[in-house]
Amino acid sequence: MKRKAIPKSPVWAALAASAALLAGGCGGADSGGRAQAEAAPPRAGQMLDPGETAQRLVKMRAQALGGDQQGLQQNLQELNRDFNRSIKLADPSKRVDRENARIAARGVKGVRSVVWIDGENLFAIVDRNADRSYGTVDAICRQLEPLGDTLGVVVNLQSGAARNGDELEILSRNCQLPPGERAMLQPNRQVDALPPQVRAQHRANADAALRAERAGERAESDRIIEANTPEM
């Protein structure tokens, strides 16, 4: 007896493609794991998606009418969590454990030593100037994610190989926010010994002094050349 041929429809094609992807999933597990490890940490401060919020509210109404208290409670908690993230409010019940965080951050490549300045500011010294980067901040924050809400953590990096004032400058950023921003109720602590404005002014003064010195040297050279050039 002949077996029935499987109809060639878009649905069957999609299922076949999915099966092929699953079959190849094992072979690409390592590359997928590396991509996940390099993924950027979650970002707070984003507005709630109107469509998703509306769908969730409709679902919550149905759960309330149907008596699904457990599902309703879960959706309420998720909505509250997403709202708090949108207004950059860290979850006080999920504070990152300081000692475990210090050990985790110490395991990031290029990090030499780690200490807590206070309950929110993590200070790390890196081996090379190139490691004093937002990429290293992201790598530390990814290590802290399983330990609590990283919106309550600011990572501060300083190079252990610095040779001048500019290289000694500390790079600071909240784990889930752009540079310069802080979570709600989180003080913007000045960790650097010299504020950026003072450092910029010193650099501008040094550049101006160097330009004046070079101009003086050129003028002196011109005077010497003129004095030693015989008149025609």
Image (cartoon, grey):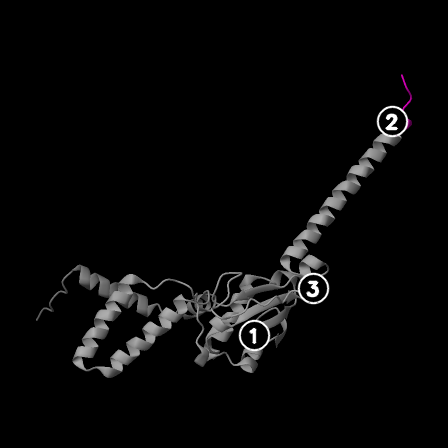
- Please state if 169 lies on the left or on the right of 92 as rendered: right
Q: Is residue 95 left or right of residue 111?
A: left
Image x and y of residue 205, in percent: 72, 49
Q: Which residue is mark 3?
A: 161
Residue depth check, mark 3 versus mark 2: number of the one nearer the observer: 2
Q: Where on the picture, by quarter, is residue 124?
A: bottom right
| Residue, disc 2 | 226
Q: Residue at x 62, y 60 (%)?
A: 130
Q: Residue at x 50, y 75 (%)?
A: 144
Label 2 environment density (alpha carbons within 10 Å; few <14, some 14–19, many ≥20): few
| Disc 2, SS | helix
Label placed on residue 105:
1
Write down the region rendered in magenta.
225-232
Q: Secondary structure at mark 3?
A: loop
Of tags 1 and 2, which is closer to the observer?
2
The quarter of the picture where residue 119 lies is: bottom right
Looking at the image, which is closer to me, 198 or 164?
198
Q: Is residue 227 magenta?
A: yes
- Label 2 sits on what residue type? Glu
Sooner in the amino-acid sequence: mark 3 or mark 2: 3
Q: Give the image location of residue 225, x and y in percent.
A: 87, 29
Out of 65 and 175, give the one closest to the viewer: 65
